[in-house]
Amino acid sequence: FFLEAHKGASCTRPTRETRDRETSGRRHHAEEQAETSYTLRYTSSNVIPEILRPSQALNPKALHPTPSAMSSSGGIRVAGGVAKKAGKGAEKAAYQGIQFLKSYGQHILKNPMIVNSIVEKGGVKATDVVLEIGPGTGNLTMRLLETAKKVIAVEFDPRMVLELQRRVQGTPHAHNLSIISGDFLKVELPYFDVCIANVPYQISSPLIFKLLAHRPQFRAATLMFQREFAMRLCVPAGDPLYCRLSVNTQLLARTTHLLKVGKNNFRPPPKVDSSVVRIEPRPINTVPVNFKEWDGLVRLCFGRKNKTLGGIFRTKTVMELIETNFKTYRALQINNGKGVAAAGAGA
């Protein structure tokens, strides 16, 4: 009887509550064992405590941080924040005591081969006075001093002025350098033969037209710009990049693309590549046009590039502007330019 009862009990299936209770007990027991076997270790490169499970403690890959342990900023995730990793550029700038400001367009050309190529293509002679805009730490300036008679450097940042003075101090070319501290767009430019510069990209357009308006005219300018801007200077009519900048620049000067410069040749590197362009002003008597009037016309023509010229000049705003300008022009031409008042007195 007891044997038959025992056999019947062993054949019965456990209930759901019994299975859940057993599963929960096994999980709880495993967690208690794992908590007692945690290990503490320190990495060799960074003293960062990390909690490792036994399965990770013997894994050689765990000795180095995995990509998942790295933050988006390049640092290692640790308790309380991210241990940031200093880049090579930051270390070098800190070593020199100079922090380059992108708001000033300070991207220093560090490749000496590019520097030599710019000076050679610039056609600098031993008797030339060279104008340099934004010399920075003086990598291009020192090469120009070895070639030209005199270098005039215009620098906006006082820190770079001191760095440039310190760099040329005690050299044979120290007396050949003249530094103008101030904003290039506001200072009065002295006489110069050629202009060679790695210019701040945010003032590229006004810089060009200030140079072309300078009198007496210089022989040539070899300037480095953002690549897209440089291509707009040199493209022929009919190209998709042809714009108001192209028209006005090619009216006043001959432009030639010289070479492309990758962004890794700068410190800190910019987000885009650069190009070097040679600009040769045309003789003044070959441009028989009032540039302000011409620029106003070109501004209207390129204001809406997707519209035809007929569509642009038929708009109400443009027709009213042309009518007003014509009336002003006629008023100034009455009586040999003596004005409306003289014409009224004569009547």
Image (spheres, grey):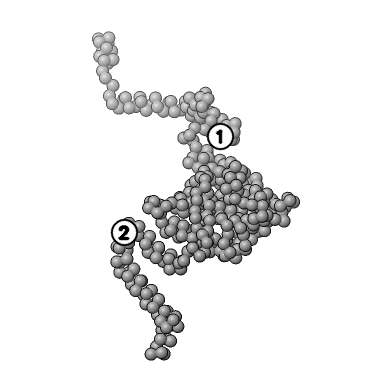
Instruction: Name the kind of residue labelled 1 in the image.
Output: Pro
How many marks can you see? 2
Quarter of the image for residue 199 reads: bottom right
Per the image, the residue denoted by label 2 is 307
Which residue lies at the image location 61% right of the left edge and 43% below the top edge? Answer: 112
- The image shows residue 90 at horizontal and vertical percentages of 59, 45
Between residues 15 and 129, which one lies in front from this camera angle? 129
Please report contact status of discs 2 and 1: CB closer than 8 Å, yes or no. no
Give the class, few, some or many, for how many residues have Cα within 10 Å of label 1's Cα (few <14, many ≥20): few
Q: Between disc 2 and disc 1, whose residue precedes?
A: 1
Q: Is residue 110 left or right of residue 324?
A: right
Per the image, the residue denoted by label 1 is 49
Quadrant housing the N terminus:
top left
Quarter of the image for residue 40 reads: top right
Q: CA distance from mark 2 to mark 1?
A: 66 Å
Is 98 situated above or below 36?
below
- The image shows residue 320 at horizontal and vertical percentages of 33, 72
Q: Mark 2 falls on what kind of element?
A: loop
- The image shows residue 98 at horizontal and vertical percentages of 63, 50
Point out the frontmost of discs 2 and 1. 2
